[in-house]
Image: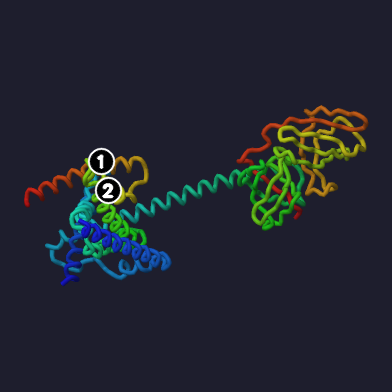
């Protein structure tokens, strides 16, 4: 049962990852990028951080490495796991501060996209995307609270 | 609250453990030359062999990822190509410079029996000595002359290591070199770091039109190369002793092409 749960979780993680990739593929401008998989990763790492997410995250990373990247196998697993750990760590640290969530979101967002920073323009583009994605994150959060 | 924190800590440990495991995977993939990451993409065929027209949309959806993957790989390939071309361009420029410097050095005089080992600066040590490429691996030895692309001596090797050597130049106060003029008078050239002092050792036949001071084979040096153009230097003759001083400017820069003459 646990195995099925893990597989199911991995599938929906992968779906989020593919949605992210296809969305960014369709968006023409480089200054606007959407990161639903990152939002999912940040959300589960801050709200439901547990060992049960390790295998789905690793699986996601491996699938990305095998089919969608030129890098070595395991590279994106490390990135995703690191993002998950750091998200939780900073969230716990900064939660009580003003803008604490925004700081932890920004840090993990930059780590998540560290491979994309090649020059100043790409960095600025990521800053724009950071604001957009943070807005999306807060919107989702608020809607989730309202639903509850 | 304490319990939650310890659970989080345990989670961190497990996460970090799996980060290391993924790192291990990278190592295995690296040493297997991407056999591991390339195995599944080489085996699996993602093309859908279904004829139903309803699946065209799925195929299109599928092709989006294929196109993206192709674009990524094409982008990477192009990036690598640009980097390779840039490296080639730099190499080409260096070779052109080298050829022109070789041309200039071979056009100075007849050095048929001499091979020129091309070298360059590595660094300057705290003793104002220069480290240059080439050492015992290139059969260099202490005392070997170092000339610039115009054929002028800029120093000699003080110490020779396996792949690099220390060059003694007039910038160093311990510089001293025996030279000769065209009338076979011998001189000792020393330096204080900014000025060269020329004093005669033995005078056979002194005339004012000596023009250049050379190194020479008779002084156990590796060839006849000019050290100084004496036409602008005023020599003082006193008691059969010739002395002169010469304030030198920039003898070379870090971009200078250096050569070490060796017998063939």
Residue B33 versus residue A46: which sits nearer the camera? A46
Residue at 25% in and 60% down: B6
In this picture, residue A143 sits left or right of residue B159: left
**Left/right of residue B139 with respect to residue B31 in the rendered view:** right
User: Which residue occupies 93% across, 30% down?
Assistant: B239
Q: Which label belongs to residue A15?
A: none
Secondary structure type for disc 1: helix
Q: Position of residue B157 (x, y in %)?
A: 72, 48
Say which residue label 1 marks: A128
- Tell me where residue A57 appears, x and y as whole percent: 25, 61
Q: Is A122 drawn above or below residue A42 in the view shown?
A: above
Residue position marked by numbered label 2 in the rendering: A109
Image height check: is B80 above or below B13?
A: above
* Horizontal relation, residue B133 to residue A44: left or right: right
Within 10 Å of disc 1 (Cα), the crowding (few <14, some 14-19, many 20+) is some
What chain does badge 2 belong to?
Answer: A
Q: Is residue A148 above or below residue B34?
A: above
Q: Chain of mark 1?
A: A
Left or right: A2, with A111 as reference point: left
Query: How far apart are the two marked residues, 2 and 1, measured between alpha carbons?
Result: 12 Å
SS of the residue under disc 2: helix
Point 79% across, 42% down: residue: B177
């Amino acid at each position: 049962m646990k195995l099925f749960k893990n597989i199911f979780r991995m599938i929906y993680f992968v779906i989020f990852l593919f949605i992210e990739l296809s969305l960014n593929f369709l968006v023409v401008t480089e200054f606007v990028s959407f990161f639903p998989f990152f939002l999912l990763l940040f959300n589960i790492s801050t709200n439901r951080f547990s060992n049960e997410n390790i295998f789905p995250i690793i699986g996601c990373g491996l699938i990305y490495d095998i089919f969608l990247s030129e890098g070595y196998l395991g590279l994106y697993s490390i990135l995703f796991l690191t993002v998950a750990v750091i998200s939780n760590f900073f969230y716990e640290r900064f939660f009580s501060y003003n803008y604490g969530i925004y700081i932890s979101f920004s840090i993990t967002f930059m780590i998540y996209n560290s491979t994309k920073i090649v020059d100043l323009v790409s960095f600025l583009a990521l800053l724009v995307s950071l604001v957009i994605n943070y807005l999306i994150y807060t919107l989702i959060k608020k809607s989730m609270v309202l639903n509850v | 609250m304490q319990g939650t924190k310890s659970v989080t800590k345990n989670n961190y440990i497990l996460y970090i453990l799996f980060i290391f495991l993924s790192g291990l995977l990278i190592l295995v993939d690296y040493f297997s030359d991407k056999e591991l990451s390339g195995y599944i993409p080489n085996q699996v065929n993602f093309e859908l062999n279904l004829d139903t027209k309803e699946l065209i949309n799925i195929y299109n959806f599928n092709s989006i990822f294929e196109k993206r993957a192709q674009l990524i790989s094409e982008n990477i390939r192009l990036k690598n190509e640009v980097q390779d071309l840039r490296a080639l361009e730099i190499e080409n420029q260096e070779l052109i410079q080298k050829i022109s410097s070789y041309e200039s050095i071979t056009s100075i005089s007849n050095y048929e029996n001499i091979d020129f080992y091309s070298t360059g600066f590595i660094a300057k040590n705290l003793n104002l000595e220069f480290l240059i490429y080439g050492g015992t691996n290139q059969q260099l030895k202490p005392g070997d002359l170092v000339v610039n692309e115009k054929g002028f001596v800029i120093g000699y090797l003080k110490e020779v290591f396996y792949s690099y050597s220390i060059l003694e130049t007039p910038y160093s106060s311990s510089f001293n070199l025996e030279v000769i003029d065209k009338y076979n008078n011998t001189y000792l050239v020393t330096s204080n770091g900014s000025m060269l002092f020329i004093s005669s050792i033995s005078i056979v036949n002194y005339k004012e039109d000596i023009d250049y001071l050379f190194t020479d084979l008779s002084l156990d040096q590796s060839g006849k190369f000019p050290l100084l153009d004496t036409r602008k230097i005023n020599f003082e003759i006193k008691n059969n002793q010739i002395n002169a001083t010469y304030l030198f400017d920039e003898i070379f820069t870090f971009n200078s092409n250096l050569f070490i003459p060796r017998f063939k």
